[in-house]
Image (tube, rainbow, N blue to C red):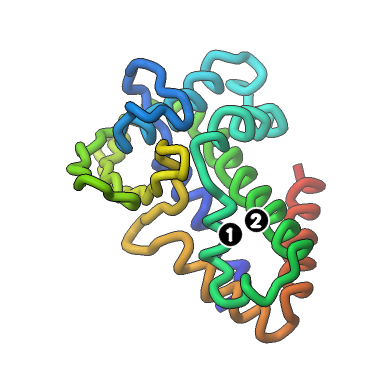
Amino acid sequence: MTIHRLLPLAPLAAVAMVSIVHAQAVQPGDLRASPERLVQAAVEGVIGTIQANPDTRAGDLGKITGVVQKQFLPYTDFQRTTRLAMGSAWRTATPEQQQQLHEQFQMLLVRSYAVSLAQLREQNVKFRYQPVKTASGATDVVVQTRVINNADEMQIDYRLQRAAAGGWKIYDINMMGAWLIEVYRKQFADIVARSGVDGLVKYLTTHNARQASDN
C-alpha cells in the first residue's frame, strides 16, 4: 500500500465534521468548555460560515480553505499530530525538517477538510455528541459522536489533549476503526525507510503543490 491510498482518509474524516446543531460559542482554549462542546464549536463555526457566505457556498475552494485555516485550526494541535504520525523518525529529524513536516502535513489536512466541506456545503448533516466523563486530572480524552445524514449513521471519535494552558485541543480522529495518526504513521515510516526524512518532506511538498495546481 502506498501513501496515495491513505490521503483520502482525512477528507473522509472531515465528512463527519459537519454539524447544524446550534450552541453557544466556545473559543479555542476555553478553560470552562467540555471536550464535546469544544468539538461541536470547532466544526459548527466552520460549516456555519461556509453556508452563510455566497462564495464559499458556491464552492470556492480557496475561500473554503481560508475558513478552515482561520476557524478550525485554532481548535487543533496539528504539531502533535505530525509528531505522533512521524513516530521515532521525528526525533531524528532536524528542527528545520520538523518545521517543514508540520507545515506540509498541516497543509495536507487543511486542504482535505476544505475539499470535503466543499462537497457537503449544502447537505443537511446532523451531529450528535456523547458527553465525556472526564476523570480529575485527565489530560487525554476521546469524544464519541454520531453523524446522521438522512437514513445513514456513522460513528466518529475525536481524541483531544489538554494543553499546558488548560484548554482542550483536537489532535486525532477515528473513522471506521482507524485512527488517523496510526494510518499515516505506517505510510510515513515506509517513505522514511526508503528515502529518509527529506524524502518525506519532498513527497508532501510535491503532493500539496500538485493538489493546489489541480484546483
The answer to which image quadrant residue 74 occupies is: top right
Residue at x 72%, y 74% (from the top left corner): 197
Give the total of numbered labels.
2
Residue at x 53%, y 47% (from the top left corner): 77
The answer to which image quadrant residue 2 occupies is: bottom right
Give the residue pinned by disc 2. Answer: 105
Q: Image quadrant for the N terminus?
A: bottom right
Q: Is residue 147 left or right of residue 12?
A: left
Give the residue pinned by disc 1. Answer: 82
**Residue 14 drawn above or below residue 189:** above
Mark 2 vs mark 1, CA separation in Å: 7 Å
Looking at the rendered structure, the secondary structure element under dot 1 is helix
Q: Are marks 2 and 1 in contact (CB under 8 Å)?
A: yes
**Residue 44 drawn above or below residue 116:** above
Q: Image quadrant for the C terminus?
A: top right
Camera-nearest residue between 110 and 60: 110
Which of discs 2 and 1 lies nearer the camera? The answer is 1
Residue at x 62%, y 14% (from the top left corner): 54
Q: Looking at the image, tell me whether mark 2 or mark 1 is earlier in sequence order.
A: 1
Camera-nearest residue between 163 and 40: 163
Residue 200: give x, y in percent of width and height.
Answer: 72, 71
Amino acid under label 1? Thr
Amino acid under label 2? Phe
